[in-house]
Image: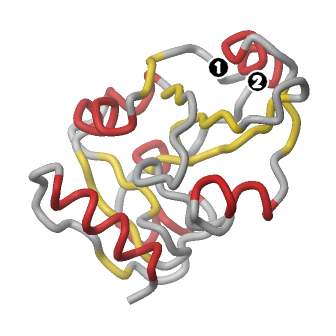
């Protein structure tokens, strides 16, 4: 078991959640993840990371699998222009490689916003630290564990 997967599994267990981590197969895209989990694409939590142009700090946006982030709205929430976070910054800050970034258990916490679309489901699926592992969770619990703020930032 990878260090990233262990960290997410331990985080969820310490939060009192049942072990719902599964090896689902290839889940690098929302489409792959939805097919692997047998759910709607919008039940997939995409963890999208941006870098603040002025601060250099990362900002995490959790969005439904079928939605795209509006750069202008996201920048407004972050109160600074946002740019793409490169793979090295993502790994150094979160501890995860792109394609397997979990919405929780980051090495360094960052401001986090969540797409209200995800709250329309009883259960959502998110990356568990690798491009092959996912976990299911109640969206309200995800909001709490990720210290996320509900906000409109999609196109």
Secondary element under disc 2, as helix, strand or loop, is: loop
Residue at the spot 46% in from the left edge and 62% down from the top edge: 127
Give how far across and how far down residue 76 sits, in percent. Answer: 74, 10
Question: Who is closer to the viewer here, 51 or 114?
Answer: 51
Give how far across and how far down residue 8 sits, in percent. Answer: 35, 64
| Rendering quarter of residue 117 | top left
Pointers 1 and 2 in contact (C-beta within 8 Å): yes
Residue 20 higher or lower than 72, as above or below: below
Residue designated by label 1: 153
Count residues near mark 2 (Cα–Cα under 10 Å), then give few for <14, some for 14-19, many for 20+.
Answer: few
Give how far across and how far down residue 26 sits, in percent. Answer: 54, 80
Side of 154 relative to 4 (left or right):
right
Question: Who is closer to the viewer here, 18 or 42?
Answer: 18
Residue 52 higher or lower than 135, as above or below: above
Question: Who is closer to the viewer here, 43 or 74?
Answer: 74
How many numbered discs, if any?
Answer: 2
Residue designated by label 2: 70
Side of 98 relative to 130 (left or right):
right
Residue at the spot 71% in from the left edge and 30% down from the top edge: 69
Count residues near mark 1 (Cα–Cα under 10 Å), then give few for <14, some for 14-19, many for 20+.
Answer: many
Residue 15 higher or lower than 51, as above or below: below
Question: Who is closer to the viewer here, 21 or 34?
Answer: 21
- Colouring mode (rainbow / by chain / secondary structure / one colour): secondary structure
């Amino acid at each position: 078991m990878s260090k990233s997967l262990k960290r997410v599994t331990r985080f969820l267990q310490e939060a009192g959640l049942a072990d719902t981590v599964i090896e689902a197969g290839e889940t690098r895209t929302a489409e792959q993840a939805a097919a692997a989990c047998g759910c709607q694409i919008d039940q997939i939590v995409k963890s999208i990371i941006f870098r603040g142009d002025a601060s250099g700090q990362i900002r995490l946006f959790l969005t439904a699998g079928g939605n795209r982030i509006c750069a202008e709205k996201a920048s407004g929430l972050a109160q600074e222009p946002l740019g793409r976070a490169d793979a090295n910054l993502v790994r150094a800050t979160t501890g995860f490689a792109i394609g397997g970034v979990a919405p929780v258990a980051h090495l360094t916490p960052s401001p986090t916003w969540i797409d209200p679309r995800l709250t329309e489901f009883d259960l959502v699926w998110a990356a568990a630290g690798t491009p092959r592992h996912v976990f299911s969770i109640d969206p309200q619990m995800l909001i709490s564990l990720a210290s996320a703020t509900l906000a409109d930032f999609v196109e």
